[in-house]
Image (cartoon, rainbow, N blue to C red):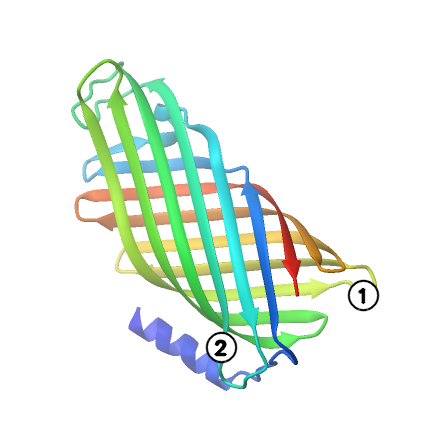
Amino acid sequence: MRNRILALGALLAAAPLAQADIIGAGASVSYWDAEVAGKAGQKGDLLDVENDLDLGDNSNTTIALYLEHPVPLLPNVRIAHSSLDQSGDSELTTDFGGIGAGVPVTSDLEFEQTDLTLYYEVLDNWVNLDLGITARDFSGELVVTQVGGAISDTTKVDAVVPMGYVAARFDLPFTGVSVGAEGNAISFDGDSMYDVNAYGQYEIALVQLRLGYREIAVDYEDGSDRFDIDVSGPFISAGLSF
């Protein structure tokens, strides 16, 4: 991991930076129609969350803020927070955490992450390119509870991980329309995480409207607990840029 971060740092140092001419700031909020797939649990006792738990959408939101400035060599700053909360009622198809197969259960999945990203504008014209490093505070928790019983099982992971960050946007002249993509990724010692999205954007005055598709994949082990989860789906967002 250290070599990956040093390599990214060297790339940023060598790149021609296109700093903003004035201070700029922006904020956005998005709704994410996400579906969850994958497995979670303890080593040797993993549950298929898609087939076994029948999770449904409750609340999936992302809030982001950024600040750009004209000071040479100092990075721009972006802060983002994403949360996902899903619950379901089902019958287990396999034994899990002391709960037998065929037993009705309720399940709750909570998924949160907060990002602090430091980045540079490498290109800033009709082609926009940002490169940087993200510190992500990530947590996930799955609670499966037997209906009418006293048995409950909790799987929880919690970590702060460094990730590479890249964002690109292509503006279509004189239209206010652009297309872009952005993402974070890291892979180390059997664990991995990536978060990518692609979108179309329409901008009018200070308002930015986006429609796109986002996917987060987490393969992470915290002690005996393991999350191998994929969260994906379309999103829509509205933002202000000053």
Mark 1 Cα shell of 10 Å, populated few (<14), some (14-19), many (≥20): few
Residue 144 appears in which quarter of the rendering? top left
Q: Nearer the viewer, residue 75 or 41?
A: 75
**Quick one: label 2 or label 1, which is nearer the N terminus?**
2
Q: Nearer the viewer, mark 2 or mark 1?
A: 2
x%, y% of residue 109? 35, 35
Question: Residue 75 vs residue 40: left or right?
Answer: right
x%, y% of residue 107? 33, 26
Amino acid type of the residue tagged 2 in the rendering: Pro
Residue 26 appears in which quarter of the rendering? bottom right
Figure quadrant of the C terminus: bottom right
Q: Nearer the viewer, residue 242 or 51?
A: 242
State the residue at coordinates (20%, 21%).
Answer: 99
Note whether 89 is above or below 110 in the view shown: above
Q: In the drawing, what numbered circle is on residue 53?
A: none
State the residue at coordinates (32%, 36%).
Answer: 39
Q: In the drawing, what numbered circle is on residue 173?
A: 1
Figure quadrant of the N terminus: bottom left
Q: Which residue is mark 2?
A: 75
Residue 33 appears in which quarter of the rendering? top right
What secondary structure is marked by label 1? loop
Amino acid type of the residue tagged 1 in the rendering: Pro
State the residue at coordinates (42%, 75%).
Answer: 8
